[in-house]
Image (cartoon, rainbow, N blue to C red):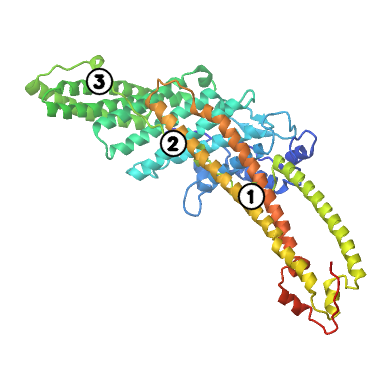
């Protein structure tokens, strides 16, 4: 199996250049180096640990051995570090770090091409190219993990191990598709050959072919010959496509490995064509035995398979492919023995005409298409780099809210002060203490007129009504978020149905569901942001209300008449007072 070589980079301290950029005038972000200090340290240390392990394009085995996790999963630690580092770079892009050169001149990110080993490194000064190179290395390690799923060369494969290998190759295909899209969006000039569209398309086709081969190997354990013929032809077509792509001049001149790869791809294509013809011949014999005729079709398939074996053996001898040579020799013996037996039976018993290779109906190949999603292949950070920081939009909304809240608090303080002065003046006119503590010390009971005013406050339940309104707003916000999630799920379901419909009816040329959904998705995204901001405001008001409820004067307003009488007992000398 083909294993993608790794990209090599030098350890680089990212903290100084990124800190300088954050604090400079050219930074569009509201973040500062002080805000991001811990996140930048994590980013830089993760890059350093990864770059120290990957020291050559072919050091997969050494890296895997050095990064075996405690549960025995080979390479798990490095893969986790690479995936985490990629997630960190995605977060950096989301908060405004540059994705093109020309903004952080002090930042020098050197990456050597995975294929041009003696070339000079590509130097970039943006986060996007760092992310592309990291993503490529994740794919390269995944291809190595897939190729080494079987721990021993002659280990008997099981359905589980073959399924695991197929999944890993599918992950490679998914990530290569994502990488191609990112490279198309990036306007960096003169990339290394491993990040060009032609090279990534070739690597994607190779990973598809190797995934298809794993599916075929898994089907051999349980499927019938007519299905195996189609799966083998699917692998043949993919290997032939990869071989054709490898012949492009722009790739051959810059990828020394292609000479060996091309011969191997061509050989695998022939090998799976032979297997497909052999399985089809067995199926033809099964059909003929039921119908009582058609034995000549089996012989025609077998002869075609033998001719292909001869072509393949010439190729493997010229390319010195020993393992493929052994497979081809084994197939030739199997096909030859069956062809001799079938021809003998036909001469003595059936006497049917044998069609030539051009008269045979081509076998229609089938291949896997469910390549998974990028989100499943690339996990998100458990602890975000800048998780304790608000986005620029959210920070602006919070600042406006705090300004309005401060204005309301000042107005409330002024209102309370004015009314407190008026109340003290009224109490002084009727010779009453100006606070409840002094009134308690005077030994007088709680006056009925004052209780009536307290009771009026309790009956108005103004605070309780405000709390109820606040809870209602919070419920509306939560329900709104759930509605948005449900709508998004329905949109995703529509996309899946649209994709299945287009696969079933490839000639359908109607409008893309995804394009039709874009305006609605944008509106939903804006609504989600507004709901989040509203929810944060509700929490702040609830916190303020909770603090107000703990005020001693507010607590006194909650007491009933009996409790207040106990706090302020009646006295025989109590005089009738004016509490208006």
SS class of the residue under badge 1? helix
Q: Nearer the viewer, mark 1 or mark 2?
A: 1
Q: Mark 1 touching mark 3, by CB under 8 A?
A: no
Q: Mark 3 touching mark 2, by CB under 8 A?
A: no
Distance of label 3 from label 2 (alpha carbons): 31 Å
Circle number at residue 506: none
Distance of label 1 from label 2 (alpha carbons): 49 Å
Residue of label 1 = 473
Q: Is residue 178 left or right of residue 327?
A: right
Earlier-in-chain disc, 3 versus 2: 2
Earlier-in-chain disc, 1 versus 3: 3
Earlier-in-chain disc, 1 versus 2: 2
Q: Is residue 577 left or right of residue 173?
A: right
Q: Is residue 95 above or below residue 553?
A: above
Disc 1 packing (10 Å; few <14; some 14–19; many ≥20)? some
Q: Is residue 554 left or right of residue 134?
A: right
Name the residue rendered at 86%, 74% in the picture. 577
Q: Is residue 357 above or below residue 552?
A: above
Residue 330 seen by the camera: no
* Numbered disc total: 3
Query: Residue 16 at x, y = what percent?
Result: 75, 41
Q: Nearer the viewer, mark 3 or mark 2?
A: 2
Which quadrant of the figure contains the C terminus?
Answer: bottom right
Name the residue rendered at 86%, 75% in the picture. 438
Disc 3 packing (10 Å; few <14; some 14–19; many ≥20)? some
Residue of label 2 = 169
Disc 2 packing (10 Å; few <14; some 14–19; many ≥20)? many
SS class of the residue under badge 3? helix
SS class of the residue under badge 2? helix
Residue of label 3 = 304
Q: Nearer the viewer, residue 59 or 419?
A: 419
Name the residue rendered at 32%, 23% in the picture. 312
């Amino acid at each position: 199996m083909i294993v993608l070589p790794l990209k090599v980079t030098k350890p680089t301290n990212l903290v100084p250049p990124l800190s300088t950029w954050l604090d400079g005038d050219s930074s569009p972000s509201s973040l500062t180096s002080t805000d991001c200090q811990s996140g930048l340290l994590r980013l830089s240390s993760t890059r350093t640990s990864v770059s120290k392990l990957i020291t050559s394009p072919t050091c997969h085995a050494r890296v895997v051995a050095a990064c075996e996790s405690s549960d025995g999963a080979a390479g798990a630690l490095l893969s986790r570090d690479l995936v985490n580092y990629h997630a960190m770079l995605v977060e950096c892009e989301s908060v405004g770090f540059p994705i093109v050169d020309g903004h952080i001149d002090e930042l020098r990110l050197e990456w050597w091409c995975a294929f041009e080993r003696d070339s000079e490194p590509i130097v970039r000064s943006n986060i996007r190219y760092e992310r592309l190179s990291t993503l490529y290395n994740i794919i390269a390690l995944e291809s190595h993990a897939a190729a080494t799923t079987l721990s021993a060369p002659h280990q008997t494969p099981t359905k589980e191990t073959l399924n695991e290998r197929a999944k890993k190759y599918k992950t490679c295909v998914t990530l290569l598709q994502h990488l191609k899209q990112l490279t198309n969006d990036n306007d960096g000039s003169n990339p290394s050959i491993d990040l060009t569209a032609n090279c990534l398309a070739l690597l994607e086709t190779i990973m598809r072919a190797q995934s298809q081969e794993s599916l075929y190997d898994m089907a051999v354990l349980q499927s019938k010959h007519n299905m195996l013929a189609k799966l083998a032809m699917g692998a043949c077509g993919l290997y032939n496509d990869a071989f054709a792509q490898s012949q492009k001049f722009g790739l051959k001149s810059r990828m020394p490995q292609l000479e060996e790869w091309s011969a191997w791809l061509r050989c695998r294509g022939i090998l799976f064509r032979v297997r497909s013809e052999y399985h089809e011949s067995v199926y033809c014999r099964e059909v003929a035995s039921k119908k009582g005729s058609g034995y000549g079709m089996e012989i025609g398939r077998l002869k075609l398979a033998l001719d292909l074996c001869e072509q393949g053996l010439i190729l493997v001898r010229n390319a010195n492919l020993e393992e493929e040579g052994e497979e081809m020799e084994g197939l030739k013996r199997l096909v030859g023995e069956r062809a001799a037996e079938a021809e003998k039976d036909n001469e003595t018993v059936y006497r049917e005409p044998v069609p030539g290779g051009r008269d045979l109906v081509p076998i229609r190949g089938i291949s896997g298409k469910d390549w998974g999603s990028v989100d499943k292949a690339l996990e998100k950070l458990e602890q975000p780099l800048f998780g304790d920081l608000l986005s620029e939009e959210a920070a602006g909304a919070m600042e406006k809210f705090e300004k309005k809240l401060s204005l309301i608090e000042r107005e409330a303080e002024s209102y309370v002060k004015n009314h407190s002065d008026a109340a003290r003046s009224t109490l002084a006119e009727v010779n009453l203490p100006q606070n409840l503590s002094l009134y308690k010390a005077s030994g007088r009971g709680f006056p009925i007129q004052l209780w009536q005013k307290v009771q009026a406050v309790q009956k108005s339940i103004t605070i309780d009504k405000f709390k109820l309104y606040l809870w209602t707003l919070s419920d509306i916000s939560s329900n709104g978020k759930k509605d948005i999630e449900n709508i998004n799920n329905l949109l995703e379901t529509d996309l899946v149905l649209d994709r299945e419909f287009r696969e079933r009816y490839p000639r359908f040329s109607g409008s893309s569901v995804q394009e039709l959904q874009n305006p609605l998705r944008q509106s939903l995204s804006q609504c989600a942001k507004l709901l989040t901001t509203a929810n944060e405001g509700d929490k702040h008001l609830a916190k303020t209300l909770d603090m107000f409820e703990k005020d001693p004067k507010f607590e006194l307003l909650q007491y009933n008449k009996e409790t207040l009488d106990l706090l302020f007992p009646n006295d025989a000398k109590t005089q009738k007072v004016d509490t208006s």
